[in-house]
Amino acid sequence: MLKDYELDKPTLETQRLILRPMTAEDAPDLKEWLGLDEVYTYWGRNASKGEKNPELLFIDPRPWVKRKPCQDFKWGMVLRETGKVIGILEIFDVQNQRMAYVGYRLHPDYWRQGMVTEALRCAVDFVFANTELLRLEATADVQNIASLRVLEKCDFVREGTVRQGKMGSRYCDYAIFGLLREDWEGLGGSCPQ
Ligand SMILES: CC(C)(COP(=O)(O)OP(=O)(O)OC[C@H]1O[C@@H](n2cnc3c(N)ncnc32)[C@H](O)[C@@H]1OP(=O)(O)O)[C@@H](O)C(=O)NCCC(=O)NCCS
């Protein structure tokens, strides 16, 4: 159940990656790539100050505010071979324990090696096997071939294309993808590796 993960976020493992919550100690790894312009070509906005200076991401600006339990998942993608955080995979904006959105970014040095596909398949399996979520949704600029491919390879269904819609703070044609629990169950309950 989502409630079980509100405080303790899980660590997941794939062949080449460990997906785990990040800490301030990961900031130097993130600094190598999280602020690069090429990561944001189809992201709907430019890199933020925090993404360019990841040490800022781990400072709580209002530590006196009691935070509500959070149902999102934000995993650092750690390459087993080096122990470095080379990507971020998020399940965010959980709505009524029913649906959530998926987002991912990877260090450009590791693009086109199947890393995000491997990570997303694992996250999908985790979500549908361990939480009550019924739908995962993702959007991708139609020009973002790599992201469209990742979603297809992870069996997300392309449900439509929004023409000149607003994605973040930019306008573009973007595709909407969805994966339902029932789709996943139909695939045998585990996306093929
Ligand atoms: C999108 C992104 C996460 C993909 O990660 P990745 O680990 O390189 O993806 P994978 O290797 O798992 O799969 C990419 C697929 O797209 C294909 N691909 C990548 N770039 C391509 C291109 N320019 N033209 C055609 N195919 C392309 C790859 O060949 C691969 O398909 P294949 O396995 O059938 O050969 C990565 O490019 C990234 O971080 N981009 C910047 C952030 C971003 O755009 N995030 C998504 C927002 S919706």
Image (cartoon, rainbow, N blue to C red):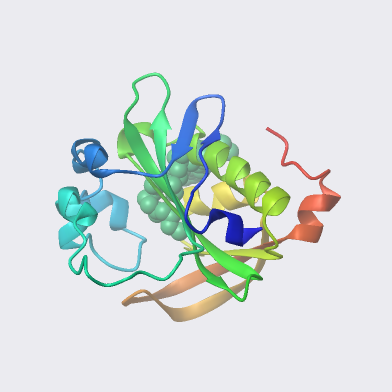
Query: Residue 24: x percent and y percent?
Result: 23, 44
Task: Answer left or right for 5 relative to 56.
Answer: right
The residue sitting at 22% across, 59% down in the picture is 47
Give the position of the N terminus as an image quadrant.
bottom right
Image spot of residue 146 (x, y percent): 48, 48
Q: Nearer the viewer, residue 37 or 74?
A: 74
- Residue 189, how many percent across, how many down? 79, 45
- Residue in the picture at 49% in, 48% down: 9
Where residue 106 sits, quadrant-wise, is: top left
123 or 105, nearer to the observer: 123
Relative height, residue 22 to residue 90 (above, below): above
Report the quarter where the C terminus lies: top right
Residue at coordinates 67% horizontally, 45% vertically from top-left?
Answer: 125
In depth, the one of 164 and 102 nearer the eye is 102
Residue 168, relative to residue 130: is it above or below? below
Q: Quadrant of residue 157?
A: bottom right
Is 39 on the left or on the right of 142, as rendered? left
Left or right: 184 in relation to 90: right
**Viewed as shown, does residue 35 lie left or right of 89?**
left
Examine the image and state in which quarter residue 133 appears.
bottom right
Q: Position of residue 54 (x, y in %)?
A: 19, 50
In this view, 79 is above or below 126: above
- Give me the residue at 85% from left, 51% from top: 186
* Image label count: 0
